[in-house]
Image (spheres, helix red, strand yellow):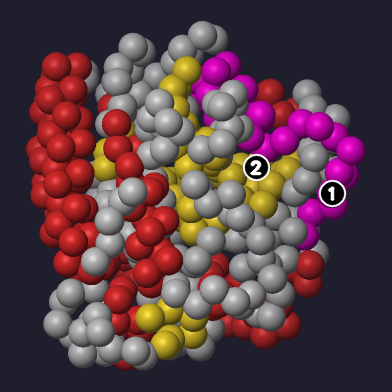
C-alpha cells in the first residue's frame, strides 16, 4: 500500500483541520467488480444535514437526485442519476484554486448534467465550456457505456482521471475525499478517510470481490484510517453503558448526511437498470434502499419530502443521532455514547437496523434480478416493492424507537 504510506505525513499535518464539507467518494471500473458493472460511492458530509430524494422530468432526460430538504427548487443536486444511465456526484476539494464570485455552484452543474447528459464524454463537453468553477470540486461521473471517471475542477480548469486507465487506477478504483491529485497536497483535507477507503478497496481487490456491498461496508466503517482504533473492539455491555468514545474523522461522521452507492449497467443492458443503493441520512441510523429512475414513476415515500416538509427516515435519523451524540456543547459532535450505537448485547441502533435493512435488500436484490432477466423495469412490481418498503420501515423504526424510548412527534 504505497499510496497510504506516502500520505501518512500529510495526515499528521492535517488531522486537526476542521472539515465542514468532508465527503468521501470512490469510483470503480466494471472490469474489476464481481458482476462486471461499474460502481460509484458518495458519502455526503455537510452542515446541511437533512436531505430528500426528488425527481424531475421537464428537460431532456428524467432524473432522480438528492437535494437539501430546504431546497424547494429541487435543483441543488448533491448526487443523482438519470433515465439514460448517467450518474453524477462530487466532493469538495480544498487544494484547488477557488474563486468565490461565480454564482455557478456544484449542485447546479450536477442538475444540468442529469437533465442534459447521457455520457461521461457529454459531461466533459459541458464543463469544458465553463470559464471556471465556483470552488474546487471532484466530480464523479458514470454512464451506461460502462465509463466512470473523476473530473478535478478548479479555477484553472479541470483534469480527468479515468478508472479504466491503468496509469491512474492500476486496480480499477479511484478514491477522492477532500483533495485533488492535481492540487497541492498540503492544502488538502480528508487523508485519513482516504487512506481507510483505499485500504478497504485494496482488500476487496485482492479477494476479487469488489461489489456495491463493499461500498456499503466502507460507509459504516468504524476503524479510524490513521489511529487504527476500531470501535468494535471497545463495545460496552449494552445501550445503558455510559462509555463515551471519541468519534472524529472516521468515514462516517456526525456530519454525514447521506450515502449513495451507484451500481451501473453492463454494455447492452437497459440504462434504466442503473441502481442507486441509498441511505437518505446517516448510514449509522438509516437503512439502505434501492432506487431506479423511470419517467413518471414514484419513489418510496420514506425518502421523500412530505406535504409538511418532513421526511420519515430523516426525522428518525435526526432523533437517533441526538441519542447517539447526546453532548450539546460546541465540540460534542466529536463524542458518542458508543453503547447506543453498538454493544455486546446487540441492542445498539446500528445493530437493530441491520436486520431491517437485510430484509429490504434481500427483496430488493430479488427484484433487481427480475429486472435484469427482463432487461427492463416492471413498474407495477416496483410500486408494490416501494409500498412494502414504506410500511415496513415505518413499522420497524417505531419498534426500535419504542425500545430506546424515542418517539417522533
From the top left corner, tell me how far across and down residue 391 is, in percent: 15, 37
Q: Quadrant of residue 390?
A: top left
Q: Quadrant of residue 75?
A: top right
Residue at 18% in and 74% down: 347
Along the line of sight, the residue nearer the viewer: 27 or 81 = 81
From the top left corner, tell me how far across and down residue 370 is, in percent: 11, 28
Q: Is residue 38 above or below residue 65?
A: below
Q: Is 254 situated left or right of 17 in this image?
A: left
Along the line of sight, the residue nearer the viewer: 307 or 34 = 307
Label 2 or label 1, whichever lies nearer to me, is 1
The mark found on residue 70 in the picture is: none
Q: Provide the residue span drawn in magenta.
A: 95-123
Judge whether residue 109 is colored magenta. yes
Q: Label 2: which residue?
A: 151
Residue at 79% in and 67% down: 187
Q: Is residue 326 above or below residue 180?
A: below
Q: Is residue 275 above or below residue 93?
A: above
The mark found on residue 98 in the picture is: 1
Secondary structure, mark 2, is strand
Amino acid at each position: 500500500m504505497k499510496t497510504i504510506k506516502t500520505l501518512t505525513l500529510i495526515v499528521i499535518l492535517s488531522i486537526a483541520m476542521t472539515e465542514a464539507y468532508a465527503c468521501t467518494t470512490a469510483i470503480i471500473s466494471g472490469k474489476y467488480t464481481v458482476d462486471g458493472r461499474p460502481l460509484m460511492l458518495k458519502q455526503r458530509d455537510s452542515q446541511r444535514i437533512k436531505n430528500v430524494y426528488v425527481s424531475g422530468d421537464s428537460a431532456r432526460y428524467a432524473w432522480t437526485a438528492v437535494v437539501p430538504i430546504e431546497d424547494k427548487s429541487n435543483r441543488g443536486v448533491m448526487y443523482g442519476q438519470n433515465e439514460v444511465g448517467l450518474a453524477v456526484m462530487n466532493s469538495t476539494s480544498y487544494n484547488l484554486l477557488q474563486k468565490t464570485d461565480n454564482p455557478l455552484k456544484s449542485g447546479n452543474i450536477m442538475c444540468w448534467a442529469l437533465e442534459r447528459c447521457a455520457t461521461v464524454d457529454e459531461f466533459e463537453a459541458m464543463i469544458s465550456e465553463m470559464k471556471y468553477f465556483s470552488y474546487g470540486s471532484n466530480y464523479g461521473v458514470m454512464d451506461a457505456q460502462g465509463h466512470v471517471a473523476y473530473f478535478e475542477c478548479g479555477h484553472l480548469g479541470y483534469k480527468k482521471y479515468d478508472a479504466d486507465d491503468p496509469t491512474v487506477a492500476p486496480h480499477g478504483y479511484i478514491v477522492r475525499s477532500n483533495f485533488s491529485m492535481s492540487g497541492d497536497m498540503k492544502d488538502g483535507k480528508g487523508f485519513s478517510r482516504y487512506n481507510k477507503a483505499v485500504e478497504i478497496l485494496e482488500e476487496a481487490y485482492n479477494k476479487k470481490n469488489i461489489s456495491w456491498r463493499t461500498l456499503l461496508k466502507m460507509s459504516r466503517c468504524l476503524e479510524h484510517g490513521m489511529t487504527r482504533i476500531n470501535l468494535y473492539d471497545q463495545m460496552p455491555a449494552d445501550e445503558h453503558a455510559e462509555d463515551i468514545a471519541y468519534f472524529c474523522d472516521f468515514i462516517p461522521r456526525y456530519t454525514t448526511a447521506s450515502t449513495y452507492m451507484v451500481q451501473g449497467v453492463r454494455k447492452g443492458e437497459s440504462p434504466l437498470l442503473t441502481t442507486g443503493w441509498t441511505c437518505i441520512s446517516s448510514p449509522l441510523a438509516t437503512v439502505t434502499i434501492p432506487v431506479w429512475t423511470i419517467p413518471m414513476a414514484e419513489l418510496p415515500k420514506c425518502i421523500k419530502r412530505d406535504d409538511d416538509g418532513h421526511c420519515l427516515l430523516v426525522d428518525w435519523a435526526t432523533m437517533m443521532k441526538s441519542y447517539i451524540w447526546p453532548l450539546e456543547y460546541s465540540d460534542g459532535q466529536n463524542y458518542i455514547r458508543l453503547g447506543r450505537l453498538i454493544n455486546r448485547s446487540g441492542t445498539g441502533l446500528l445493530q437493530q437496523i441491520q436486520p431491517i435493512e437485510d430484509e429490504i435488500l434481500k427483496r430488493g436484490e430479488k427484484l433487481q434480478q427480475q429486472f435484469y432477466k427482463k432487461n427492463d423495469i416492471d413498474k407495477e412490481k416496483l410500486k408494490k416493492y416501494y409500498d412494502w418498503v414504506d410500511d415496513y420501515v415505518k413499522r420497524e423504526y417505531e419498534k426500535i424507537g419504542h425500545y430506546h424510548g424515542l418517539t417522533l412527534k
